[in-house]
Amino acid sequence: MELVVFVLASAMMLIGAVGVITRSNPVHAALSLVLTLFGVAVHFVALEAYFLAAVQIIVYAGAIVVLFLFVIMLLGVDKAENLSAEPLVAQRWLAGVAGLGLLGLLVVAVARGADVLATRAGGLDTSAEAAGGDANIQQLARSVFGDYVVAFELTSVLLVVAVVGTVMLARRRAAGDA
Amino acid sequence: MAEPTTLSYLIVAALLFVIGTVGVMVRRNPLIMFMCIELMLNAVNLSFVALARELTDIDGQSIVFFVLVVAAAEVVVGLGIIVAIMRNRSSLTADDMAELKG
């Protein structure tokens, strides 16, 4: 059963990812991105990261993809671009070779680390009995608001900077304004 | 039926990361390049969560939480820059941004 879920979620994820880079219409690419994000969320549930799965759906599939679609519509670029023309000589061919090389490196690195993993068996104690059904959220909250509370407060500064910066970027300058 | 191992999660994450990398290298639309960066971030998040379970350590999930926040901020600023650049242009490709070319 878990293997079936894994295979289906991986297929969703990878088909969506291939869709993002092959669709010529940006709207279709954004919708393929949603498929990928849902696949990753299913993986999160299978890996017992229930809170992150919910956040993944709400923040990524909800907010970020809507932001993408909003910008696509705002700029009016929701028409298919011509993908048959290759702008640089041998760009795609070289990108494919580089991608295969990177994949090889990553798989070798993962395989070399696999024997280290085999010595540390077990899983997070996220069973429903551990803390009345929300052990994952309790553990995560202890970690985020305990060990990483300074980093958590700094993310609020980051978000304020991002919002102010975006407002400044998107503002239309008045005439004569430097 | 057998359970998927952490190794298989890591290999699927590596595949997703490579697809995102190839997308950044191949596509010329800055919006699509942003989406490919999101693909790479998701691949890394998946590795973090898989290893958090494997190593019985919740810190992996905490880091994914922060990555989500930073990714949201990054998308907001990036799309703001794209809107600011593209407001007075008709086409939308990364090759058009060549004002600083000597």
Image (cartoon, coloured by chain):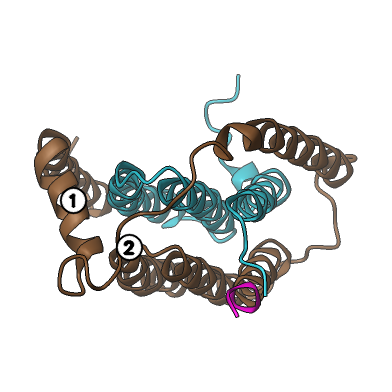
Chain colours: A brown, B cyan
SS class, disc 1: helix
Residue A49 is inside the magenta segment: no
Q: Is residue A50 left or right of residue A145?
A: right
- A31 or A128: nearer the viewer: A128
How packed mark 2 is, by other alpha carbons closer than 10 Å (few <14, some 14-19, many 20 or more), is many
The residue segment tinted magenta is A1-5
Question: Residue B88 location, x and y as percent?
Answer: 44, 55
Give above or below for B46 relative to A23. Answer: above
| Residue type at numbered disc 2 | Leu
Output the chain of dot 2: A
Q: Quadrant of the C terminus of chain A?
A: top left
Q: Is residue B44 left or right of residue B56?
A: right
Give above or below for B29 relative to A164. Answer: below
Q: Which mark is residue A163?
A: 1
How packed mark 1 is, by other alpha carbons closer than 10 Å (few <14, some 14-19, many 20 or more), is some
Question: Residue A150 location, x and y as percent?
Answer: 11, 34
Output the chain of dot 1: A
Residue A50 occupies which quadrant of the picture?
bottom left
Q: Which residue is rendered at x = 37% and y = 53% of the image?
A: B75
Q: Which residue is rendered at x = 19% and y = 41% of the image?
A: A158
Please name the residue that numbered disc 2 is placed on: A52
Question: Residue A172 location, x and y as percent?
Answer: 23, 54
Residue A61 occupies which quadrant of the picture?
bottom left
Q: Main secondary structure of the magenta part?
A: helix
Residue A2 is inside the magenta segment: yes
Q: Which residue is rendered at x = 36% and y = 44% of the image?
A: B60
